[in-house]
Amino acid sequence: MKREAQLVMIPLSAVGHIVSTIEFAKLLTNHDHRLSITILVIKPENDDEATRITSYTRSLPSSQRVHIINLPECPMDPETPSSSQFQAHIDNQKPNVRQILSDLSGPPLAAFVVDMFCTSMIDVAKEFEVPSLVFYTSGAAFLSLMLHLHTLREQDNLDRSESKEFVIPGFLNPVPRTALPSIVSNKVWDSFFMDYGRGLKKADGIIVNSFEELESHAVHSFSNSPIPIYPVGPILNPSTNNTNTEILEWLDQQPRSSVVFLCFGSRGSFGEDQVQEIAIALENSGVRFLWSLRKPPIRDPVKPTFAPPCDYSVSELAAVLPAGFLDRTAGIGKVIGWAPQAQVLAHQATGGFVSHCGWNSTLESIYYGVPIAAWPIHAEQQTNAFELVCELKMAVEIALDYMDDFISAPNFLVTADRIEKGIRSVMEIDEETRKKVKEMSEKSRSTLSEGGCSYSYLGRLIDYIMEQV
């Protein structure tokens, strides 16, 4: 009789994390038909984000082996301090998760797979006596950095004020302090960082959205780790659903590799002064451009906001850009709101990518062979940018040390001259770097096929899961 197994997955309530989780679930079930997966979706507090998640999940074709359950909304206790609300939003769902697990039918539950920010749910997995795996939506080098710095912090040996650089097992070069994420460098996030590290160390294994061919040194640095890692990426969503045809039609009219694409992720945005500098740089460069320009959320100096940006109205857009900019650049550029990023990167007209270096964006740019000009904003993006530019030497720099961490204002204004230099550099990138990007693109497309490293790790992961039945 054929053995079957069931997994329960809990992603973070953010579109990027949910897309990656569902694509990973599809990857597992397509690879081994003995698996069925239930994904529990927590509704985000932000209504716009909730609408985007609902729209995405409803657009998915029905599947017999991947089931999505939307968890009931749990009101936040008004007395919860702002610093604890992120974790409380997840923990409040534990009773609902317990109930669903108790009512679960079908194949036996083999394991829990929780998002890298939902590790408190590991406690529920232990109650049901099943192993827990963390789905890590960042890279292996960043995972190494976070675990190592957490260990130093546990030993009271993490000097963030004096040390200018840190030796990290997953990096060949010392990592400068400016490349650390804000949850490490800013003491405001101390409690969150410690909980985050403890959560990762409770897992029975960590599934990483990366591939060994890209991060060979970082992956090998885990060879003696007590927690096994499974780099099974790149996991991305290459579908063409919800494509803006106007954007692609504009790209169709541009010469091959002639357009620089500026896009800063689902939460990336800039204030008016920085927008002006970008506009000046684009106009001075004379390069064809497609610019995804989003309106930032209102910044609360007391309570950090994690609300995503939104699109400008036509009148707002004209007001935030230099006078006459849209008319003067109408022949070579296009300013848009939300962008179908994967489809733009896949288009033959796209020759360079000014990016915040979020990990999903990094994997997409590598997959489609588009070189990056790195301009990180927050979260792990500074570390990713350092890895791309200094470790892998697959990108050029605009501002590796720029930081906007939701709490304070950006640490500096990136000038038009600096941005223009980065745009020119990525569009005229040297032959050696372009060759590296092309070769890694080919490896990213083959690694999940038989003989590839990710294919091998995926097989090992499924063997582990089936052993739990």
Image: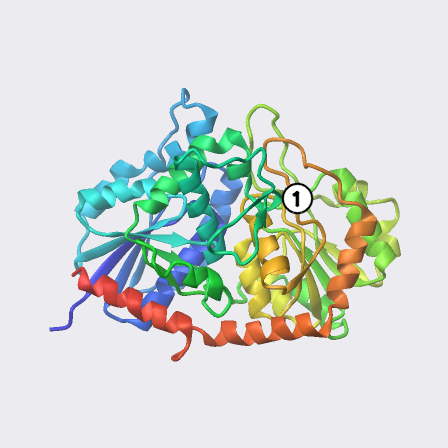
Residue 410 rendering spot, x and y as whole percentages:
68, 37
At horizontal 45% and vertical 52% (from top left) the residue drawn is 144
Q: Which of the pair 249/128 is nearer the observer?
A: 128
Q: Write the residue at 58% across / 33% down.
A: 161
Which quarter of the rendering shows the N terminus? bottom left
In depth, the one of 91 and 393 nearer the eye is 393
Q: Position of residue 63 (x, y in %)?
A: 33, 64
Q: Position of residue 162 (x, y in %)?
A: 59, 35
Q: Is residue 87 above or below residue 303?
A: below
Type of the residue with mark 1: Ser
Mark yes or no: residue 189 visible.
yes
31 vs 434, nearest the viewer? 434
The quadrant where residue 255 appears: bottom right
**Residue 315 relative to residue 263: left or right:** right
For this view, does 213 lie left or right of residue 99? right
Position of residue 278 in the picture relative to residue 115 (left or right)? right
How many discs appear? 1
Secondary structure of residue under mark 1: loop
Q: Residue furthest left?
A: 1
Name the residue beneath numbered marker 1.
269
Residue 202 picture location, percent across and down: 30, 45
Q: Quadrant of residue 345?
A: bottom right
Q: Is residue 61 above or below residue 411?
A: below
- The residue at the point 54 percent across, 67 percent down is 240
Is residue 236 at least partly visible in the picture?
no
Rendering colour mode: rainbow
Image quadrant holding the C terminus, namely bottom left
- Look at 21% across and 47% down and name the residue there: 101
Q: Identify the image quadrant of residue 86.
A: top left
Residue at the far bottom: name it: 451
